[in-house]
Image (tube, grey):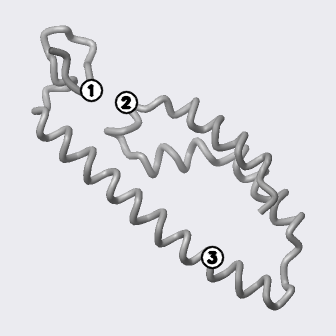
Amino acid sequence: MERFPPGPDPADLNGHGHEEEDWAETLARSVAHLAAQLTVNQIRLRGLATELGERNLIDRAAVAARVRLIAETETGDYLRENLGESLVEIIDVEALEQDLIDYLREDDI
């Protein structure tokens, strides 16, 4: 039975010499940490955007353009930083990066 994540050595069914439980724990911690970061940032950004919008202090089109520019230039770096070493090894980061860029190109903010 092949275990998660597979490594290049067929004799090493665990991937990199880690026990299966270690991988599961690392994955669970990584996902929980990412979810917590995302939630905190969503709350902060929602508060900021609401306050700025209510005061008519933002140009929505300019913000949308800035988001697209940042997405195209920095998404991969943010993903790799936020995913961490363990998840970068098992996720197609380039495909996810492109999906996010495409999504943000179409988002009107």
At 19% from the left edge and 8% from the top edge, which residue is drawn? Answer: 10
What amino acid is at disc 3? Arg
Mark closest to the chain's N terminus, 2 or 1: 1
What element does badge 2 sit on? loop
Task: Name the mark nearer the viewer: 3 or 2.
Answer: 3
User: Label 1 vs label 3: CA separation?
Assistant: 36 Å
Q: Which residue is mark 1?
A: 5
What amino acid is at disc 2? Ile
Percent coordinates x, y for residue 25 in the rendering: 18, 47
User: Label 3 vs label 2: CA separation?
Assistant: 31 Å
Q: Is residue 17 left or right of residue 77?
A: left
Q: Contact, CB < 8 Å: mark 2 with mark 1?
A: yes
Mark closest to the chain's N terminus, 1 or 3: 1
How many neighbours does mark 3 have within 10 angstroms: few (below 14), some (14-19), or many (20 or more)?
Answer: few
Mark closest to the chain's N terminus, 3 or 2: 3
Depth check: 78 or 40 in front? 40
Percent coordinates x, y for residue 108 in the rendering: 81, 58
At 37% from the left edge and 31% from the top edge, which residue is drawn? Answer: 89
The quadrant of the picture occupied by the C terminus is: bottom right
Depth check: 27 or 69 in front? 27
Percent coordinates x, y for residue 100 in the rendering: 64, 43
Depth check: 80 or 34 in front? 34
Q: Is residue 40 left or right of residue 56?
A: left
What amino acid is at disc 1? Pro
**Numbered tag placed on residue 90 in the rendering:** 2
What element does badge 1 sit on? loop
User: Relative to 8, does residue 44 appear above or below in the rendering?
Assistant: below
Q: Which residue is mark 3?
A: 46
The quadrant of the picture occupied by the N terminus is: top left
